[in-house]
């Protein structure tokens, strides 16, 4: 049996998906009356998942270091993604007895000459997002400890199910598997918002579902189109085409075979547009963002945390993993101007909207629109620095925004209002809370030494890089820089209104959950690790940047080749050397 | 005329052979006769005769499965090597001198219809909708309709087409009015009869036009005649316009569209489903539509796959037929799906909502047929099976809940999760599967349809048939948008059941749970488990539906092997 000899890592990777699923089922079956047991069980499950995720983080760091030392994986010989720890590998290429480096032997559905596979793995692009998902699960469980008192078993079951789907999205290397998790993630969040949300929860849940469902249906068409187009156009010299659903294989096919087809541009255009609609809704880019503030405001704290912390990254991750590598020419010719423009509008628009909000949750929701615009700007610089910055930005935004939502959730649990006009001078009443809020706001605004700064710096550096400047004007860098300024502006205003000035404390809600005064031990223990991570990533981001570097180089190289084809002048300095200076690597 | 002994013997052998192939249908006939006789015996009449019907249906199902897997003797059961499976080859055999056709497609539909009827009989035993004293009538009508539908799936002659459709329809009319004390039920039945009679008349008129034009009703001969007319009328034109042929085909399509409940011939559907018992509605929604789709598939493919006298399909003929049929089917599909989904949103009665949802799904299946390719037929068969479990499950839960609450209004499902978690979870799974969320059966089915539409669009475009290609791509987009529209009303039900609190909870009281019988829960649970199985493990079903569709000919593209991979890049 193959199961018995499965290496430990493969088993653990499966466990990363299976553990939350099993926990969700167990919790659902425990019934509504065992609240304490359910909470502790969910906590244990998320701790175990976190442990596995951290184990993989260490393993990936080690492996990348080994590869570095042996020089195996350099940018030059990595035309596509190379996931590690793939369970069931090495696969056999369909129809032959050749080993398939871009697949696994676990076929789910055989379709003619190809197969949809259970192809999951880790690489530099997704490992830190997986860790982020696991990290944020912990505060999600803890913050709901007293907040959620009715239908507890359902709540934790949906929360754990949500974690499975988010993990699945990041881990999937099969395009259909990716889509399955992508679509499935709507269901738990629909219920989380719809059952435990605020007064407008039903409307918010429906709008969220339908909006993202519309986007993902169009994405599905794009995915089917892409796979079948690859199948038609990859046949060479009489041999039949290749039907594959594996993302690395598709990337490779697009670059080795499809690119020579005269219809390449047209195919890429439709693929890009179809994929973009789904991901742009998820990010959200500006004209597609209206579901987000509503969903955030209505969602329970844990839902907001996962929505802002992880699910928004799914859109950006989709751009990075699918859109850019699978439609590089169109990403360069059309995506770059289009997405960067939308992102730039989003940065300013989101920031201005955030400034004018009275509801703190809405303020943070709009700040997410602004921040994600920054992140997209980084990704679509299509160079190593910018893309690294974009991914860093995803992680940082995940941490700091999640922490902000957690903090707001805590104060809401006490006073049952989130309006800034109801508060004033709370720093005197809740000093610990105030210091955490200031700290996290600074991280979010990008104070040097904290994590937000690293991402912003890299994104800005990417934008300012010569090649990007020749493509556009200096307008984008200016907008991006102003976004940082605006971010500080609305966050500081929020701090001033909430924490400082004459003391004005709303009435403690009668019949609330009995929480009064400053943060208790549980609340401190859930926010402190995030704050620590913010600091750690701010002063020592190297391990994260180093592990993602080879895969970022892969994406950047793909874009680089597209630039060559488009006739954009190459820089004198090879991209990898220039960029590694930014990443803290010693030049030879 | 003198007939020699030899030829009598020949005919007798043939008849025996044909009857053997017709065995599942004979089982049903036998069951009907026995049930009717047993009404005369008072002791037997008092027992629940659905059990007997179920036994015979399962018997017929076993025979069909044996035929499918090529088992005809006892030895072959033990020894798989000796089997001669039909699946995998495309043998076709006319039976009863060509009135019916026996091939993989027939067998697939037989198994589909028989297993569905068996499931409906089990459901009716669980819900007790026919009382024991009425069970004889109910099971006779149900089996009679099933028999007609099986004939629809194997009809190969216009005469048989009409007889089969009527044989399926007439018992359905009676079934719709089965709740005798219920006014709505009688009204539904009457509406069904009037609409059905009208549609049957139109269809018969169309058949008479076609048969009159060619002097035969035998479908392959009709197809040959079609080709001659289309080709000779005006050389150079893509399609020739022949008014008789046009009207004849259109009228036949109208008759079938009525059975499929395609817009604008769908008016009966919501009323009938609302008035009839949920069990009957489940039966009509799946079996009746499935059989009609099968007949439409048979009709279109036989027309399309005729070329030279050797029965090898020719591309010219295929495209002539495609230009004739594809736009019509595609238009039906697009309008049906869109209208069904839009109308479903406003419904407050669960069965009415499901009725419009089945209309929309019929549109999806028509999209698969509109490709007029073997893959398209295979996708439709896949869709049918996924739709069987999902739709039957939804109607079954509606029936179980009706037994609890006496209501089928969506409003009565408010806060159902507090009262009956099992029914809520299973009904949500059925609805979400109808919506098409992975990894459920509904998603797999929609994925198949989208895939073949894209595939067909690409092939037609590559072969310079850009009108057909554009039609396919348009259907693709319409299908995707419609899936989103359908989210509105499926979510509405889910929301009512799970997000809303029951009135008692709002008033601070304990909600009263329903006591769902264990067997009901088991039934719903098994069906929802099957939805997961079909949604995750597509392979067996894909192989079966491919085998089922292998009776139809491939589009004869000019490339030698006609494999899509061999089409040179543009």
Image (cartoon, coloured by chain):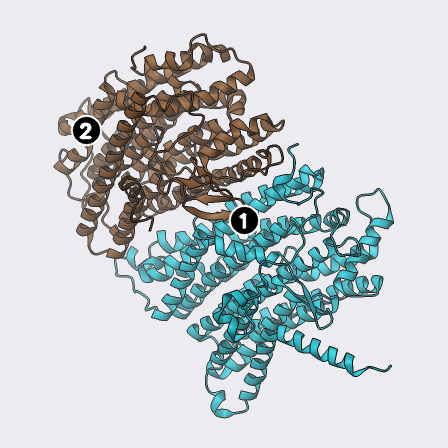
Camera-side residue of A350 and A462: A462
Camera-side residue of B404 and A94: A94
Residue at disc 2, secondary structure: loop
Q: Chain of mark 1?
A: B
The residue where tag 1 is placed is B448
Give the chain letter for brown: A
- Percent of width and height locating residue B22: 63, 73
At x 47% / y 42%, what residue is drawn? A97
Q: Quadrant of residue A544?
A: top left
Mark 1, Cα crowd under 10 Å, few <14 / some 14-19 / many 20+, is many
Above or below residue A211? Residue A556 is above
Drawn colour of chain B?
cyan
At x 52% / y 54%, what residue is drawn? B542
- Percent of width and height locating residue A38: 21, 50
Camera-side residue of B427 and B489: B427
The C terminus of chain A, quarter of image: top left
Dots 1 and 2: beta carbons under 8 Å?
no
Q: Chain of mark 2?
A: A
Res A370 seen here: no
Q: Is residue A2 left or right of residue B133?
A: left
Mark 2, Cα crowd under 10 Å, few <14 / some 14-19 / many 20+, is some
Which mark is in front, 1 or 2? Answer: 1
Q: CA distance from mark 1 to mark 2?
A: 61 Å
């Amino acid at each position: 049996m193959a199961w018995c000899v499965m290496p430990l890592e493969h088993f653990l990777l499966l466990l990363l998906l299976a553990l939350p699923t099993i926990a969700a089922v167990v919790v659902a079956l425990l019934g509504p009356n065992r609240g304490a047991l359910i909470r502790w069980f969910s906590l244990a499950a998320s701790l175990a998942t976190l442990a596995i995720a951290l184990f993989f983080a260490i393993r990936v760091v080690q492996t990348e270091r080994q590869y570095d030392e042996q020089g195996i994986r350099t940018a030059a010989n990595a035309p596509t993604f190379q996931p590690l720890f793939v369970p069931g590998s090495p696969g056999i290429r369909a129809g032959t007895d050749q080993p398939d480096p871009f697949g696994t032997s676990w076929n789910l559905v055989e379709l003619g000459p190809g197969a949809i596979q259970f192809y999951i793995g880790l690489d530099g692009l997704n490992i830190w997002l997986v860790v982020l998902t696991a990290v944020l699960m912990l505060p999600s469980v803890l913050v709901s400890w007293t907040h959620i008192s009715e239908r507890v078993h359902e709540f934790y079951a949906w929360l754990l199910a949500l974690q499975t789907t988010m993990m699945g999205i990041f881990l999937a290397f099969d395009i259909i598997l990716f889509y399955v998790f992508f679509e499935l993630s709507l269901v738990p969040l629909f219920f989380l918002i719809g059952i435990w949300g605020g007064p407008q929860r039903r409307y918010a849940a429906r709008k969220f579902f339908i909006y993202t469902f519309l986007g993902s249906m169009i994405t599905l068409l794009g995915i089917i189109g892409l796979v079948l187009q690859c199948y038609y156009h990859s046949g060479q010299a009489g041999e039949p085409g290749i039907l594959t659903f594996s993302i690395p294989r598709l990337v490779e096919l697009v670059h080795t075979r499809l690119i020579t087809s005269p219809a390449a541009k047209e195919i890429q255009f439709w693929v890009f547009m179809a994929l973009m609609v789904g991901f742009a809704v998820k990010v959200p880019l500006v004209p597609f963002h209206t579901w987000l503030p509503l969903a955030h405001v209505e969602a329970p704290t844990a839902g907001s945390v996962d929505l802002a912390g992880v699910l928004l990254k799914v859109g950006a991750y989709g751009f990075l993993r699918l859109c850019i590598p699978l439609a590089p020419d169109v990403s360069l010719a059309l995506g770059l101007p289009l997405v960067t423009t939308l992102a730039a509008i989003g940065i300013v628009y989101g920031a201005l909207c955030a400034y004018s909000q009275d509801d703190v949750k809405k303020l943070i929701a709009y700040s997410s629109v602004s921040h994600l615009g920054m992140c997209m700007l980084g990704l679509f610089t299509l160079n190593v620095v910018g893309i690294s910055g974009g991914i860093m930005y995803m992680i940082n935004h995940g941490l700091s925004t999640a922490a902000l939502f957690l903090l707001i959730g805590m104060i809401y649990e006490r006073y049952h209002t989130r309006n800034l006009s109801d508060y004033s001078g709370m720093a005197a009443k809740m000093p610990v809370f105030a210091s955490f809020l200031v700290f996290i706001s600074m991280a979010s605004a990008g104070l040097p030494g904290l994590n937000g700064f690293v991402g912003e710096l890299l994104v800005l550096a990417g934008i300012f890089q010569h090649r990007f400047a020749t493509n556009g004007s200096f307008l984008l860098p200016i907008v991006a820089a102003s976004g940082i300024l605006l971010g500080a502006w609305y966050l500081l205003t929020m701090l001033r209104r909430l924490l400082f000035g004459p003391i004005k404390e709303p009435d403690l809600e009668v019949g609330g959950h009995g929480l009064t005064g400053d943060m208790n031990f549980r609340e401190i223990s859930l926010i402190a690790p995030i704050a620590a991570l913010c600091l750690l990533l701010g002063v020592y981001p190297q391990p994260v940047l180093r592990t993602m570097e080879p895969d970022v180089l892969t994406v950047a190289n793909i874009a680089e080749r597209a630039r060559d084809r488009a006739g954009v002048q190459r820089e004198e300095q090879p991209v990898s050397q220039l960029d590694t200076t930014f990443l803290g690597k010693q030049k030879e | 005329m003198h007939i020699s002994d030899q030829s009598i013997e020949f005919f007798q052998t043939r008849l025996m052979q044909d009857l053997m192939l017709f065995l599942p249908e004979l089982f049903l006939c036998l069951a009907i006769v026995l049930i009717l006789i047993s009404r005369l015996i008072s002791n037997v009449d008092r027992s629940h005769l659905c059990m007997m019907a179920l036994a015979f249906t399962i018997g017929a199902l076993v025979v069909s499965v044996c035929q499918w897997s090529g088992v005809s003797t006892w030895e072959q059961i033990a020894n798989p090597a000796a089997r001669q499976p039909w699946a995998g080859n495309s043998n076709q055999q006319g039976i009863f001198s060509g009135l019916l056709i026996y091939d993989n497609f027939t067998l697939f539909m037989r198994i589909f219809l028989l297993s569905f009827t068996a499931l409906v009989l089990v459901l009716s035993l669980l819900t007790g909708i026919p009382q024991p004293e009425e069970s004889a009538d109910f099971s006779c009508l149900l089996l009679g309709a099933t028999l007609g539908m099986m004939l629809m799936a194997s009809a190969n002659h216009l005469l048989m087409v009409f007889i089969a459709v009527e044989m399926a329809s007439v018992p359905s009319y009676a079934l719709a009015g089965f709740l005798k004390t219920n006014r709505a039920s009688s009204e539904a039945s009457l509406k069904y009869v009037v609409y059905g009679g009208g549609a049957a008349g139109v269809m018969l008129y169309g058949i008479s036009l076609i048969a009159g034009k060619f002097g035969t009703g035998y479908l392959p001969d009709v197809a040959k005649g079609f080709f001659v007319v289309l080709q000779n009328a005006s050389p150079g034109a893509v399609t020739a316009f022949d008014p008789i042929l046009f009207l004849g085909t259109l009228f036949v399509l109208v008759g079938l569209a009525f059975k499929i409940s395609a817009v604008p011939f769908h008016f009966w559907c919501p009323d009938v489903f609302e008035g009839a018992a949920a069990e009957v509605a489940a039966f009509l929604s799946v079996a009746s539509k499935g059989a009609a789709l099968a007949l439409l598939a048979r009709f279109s493919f036989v027309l399309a796959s005729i070329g030279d006298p050797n029965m090898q399909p020719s591309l010219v003929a295929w495209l002539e037929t495609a230009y004739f049929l594809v736009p019509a089917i595609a238009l039906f599909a697009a309008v049906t799906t869109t209208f069904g989904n839009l109308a479903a949103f406003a419904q407050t009665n669960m069965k009415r909502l499901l009725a419009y949802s089945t209309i929309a799904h019929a549109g999806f299946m028509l999209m698969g047929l509109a490709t007029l390719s073997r893959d398209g037929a295979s996708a439709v068969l896949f869709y049918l099976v996924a739709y069987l479990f999902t739709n039957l499950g939804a109607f079954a839960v509606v029936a179980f809940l009706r037994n609890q609450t006496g209501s089928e209004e969506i409003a009565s499902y408010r806060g159902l999760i507090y009262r009956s978690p099992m029914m809520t979870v299973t009904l949500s799974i059925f609805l979400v599967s109808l919506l098409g969320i992975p990894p459920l059966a509904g998603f797999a089915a929609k994925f198949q349809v989208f895939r073949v539409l894209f595939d067909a669009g690409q092939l037609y475009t590559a072969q310079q048939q850009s009108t057909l290609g554009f039609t396919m791509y348009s259907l693709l987009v319409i299908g995707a948008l419609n899936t989103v529209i359908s989210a509105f009303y499926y979510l509405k039900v889910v929301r009512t059941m799970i997000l809303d609190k029951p009135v008692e909870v709002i008033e601070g009281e304990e909600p009263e749970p329903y006591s769902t019988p264990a067997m009901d829960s088991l039934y719903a649970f098994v069906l929802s488990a099957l939805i997961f199985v079909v949604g995750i493990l597509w392979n067996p079903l894909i192989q079966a539906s491919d085998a089922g569709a292998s009776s139809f000919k491939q589009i004869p593209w000019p490339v030698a092997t006609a494999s899509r991979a061999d089409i040179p890049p543009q």
